[in-house]
Image: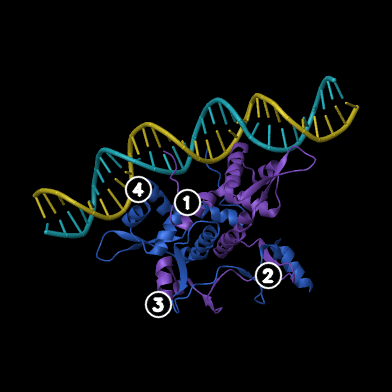
Chain colours: A blue, B purple, C yellow, D cyan
DNA sequence: GGCATCGGTTGCATCTTGCAACTGAAGCAA
DNA sequence: TTGCTTCAGTTGCAAGATGCAACCGATGCC
């Protein structure tokens, strides 16, 4: 049977999974951040089958995560991250951070380009800057929140 | 052919995708955060087929993201997030935040339980607290970083 | 022109996914 | 106790997804 689709789910998480709930798509985006731009580069760096890569690249382009850009002086084109695609950096890093947290080695460190010092681990912060744990937060429906905000 | 496995990949991102590079697994974890604990609860809230759910739950338990806990006074058991599983909160929220950023409505708001104010969006921060954009950071091999750190 | 490379397409074989039907163990009501 | 229902799966099947290898046409390059 056809795989279930969540592109019209009300939950933004489920909708996003339509785009990145697929291993190859995530790895393609990772490689795009790493500098890959050509079909052949993705193929070689990921070891992915050409047909799969074709389908994934098209999907990522259709979703506005990658875009095809013509290469001057060549009939071939390249794939570049869009603004939306670059927004996935945070997601990728969050996953990486989680993966490092649970055992395994830490082969890479994310550093500040300016002073070469490691970047702070991702964490939630309240409006006043306090760091928040998962138990300190709650996901509330938007309309309920705006009602509460109006009441005060 | 069998799906390619990345459980032994050197990249923590790729390894993590082995666990969460699957739509149902992510949604199951989401529901676990939302309070689902029983097989039937996950089935109903997600509309997932029983056989798929069985396999996913077993995988998540094997990976140490969920654990089966016996229910006193009953022969049935429940599934609960482990410490490792709760660590996925940040990842899920990062994905949600990205999904909200790119069009679509924003049905939920993450609020601080203490003062009911919305939590700041996730972002990277340098060691001194400055907020960092993706372009301000770089992923460097750990040994190269420690070499650079030693040099200074 | 001749040959290699790039960027795919096509054809299988095998896995995975989804639905539905079935099962066996609890739980419960009369 | 019997019968009915719910829970938590298991099994069988149809169809879609994935992976490999072979093929192909349009560049690129000597």
Label 1 vs label 3, nearer the camera: 3
Q: Quadrant of the C terminus of chain B?
A: bottom left
* Quarter occupied by residue B130: bottom right
* Residue to which mark 4 is pinned: A50
**Pointer 2 residue:** B118
Which SS class for mark 2? loop
Separation of marks 2 and 4 at Cα, in angstroms: 44 Å
- Subunit of label 1: A
Dot 1 and dot 2 within a common chain: no
Where is residue B143 shown, x and y percent of the image? 41, 67
Alpha-carbon span between mark 1 and mark 3: 38 Å
Q: Residues within 10 Å of mark 1 (few under 14, many from 20)?
A: many
Query: Residue A23: which disc?
Result: 1
Q: Position of residue D28 (x, y in %)?
A: 20, 59
Crowding at label 2, few (<14), some or many (≥20) Cα neighbours within 10 Å? Answer: some
Q: Residue at x 35, y 61 (%)?
A: A37
Q: Earlier in the sequence, mark 1 or mark 4?
A: 1
Which residue is disc 3 drawn over? B151
């Amino acid at each position: 049977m056809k795989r279930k689709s969540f592109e019209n789910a009300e939950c933004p998480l489920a909708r996003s999974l339509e785009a990145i709930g697929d291993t190859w798509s995530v790895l393609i985006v990772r490689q795009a951040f790493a500098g890959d731009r050509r079909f052949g580069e993705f193929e070689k760096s990921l070891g992915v089958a050409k047909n799969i890569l074709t389908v994934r690249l098209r999907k990522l382009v259709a979703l506005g995560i990658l875009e095809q850009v013509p290469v001057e002086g060549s009939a071939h084109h390249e794939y570049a991250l869009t603004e939306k695609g670059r927004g996935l950096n945070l997601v990728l890093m969050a996953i990486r951070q989680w993966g490092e947290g649970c055992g395994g080695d830490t082969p890479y460190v994310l550093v500040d380009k300016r002073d070469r010092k490691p970047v702070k681990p991702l964490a939630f912060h309240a409006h006043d800057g306090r760091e928040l744990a998962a138990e300190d937060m709650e996901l509330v429906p938007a309309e309920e929140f705006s009602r509460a905000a109006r009441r005060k």
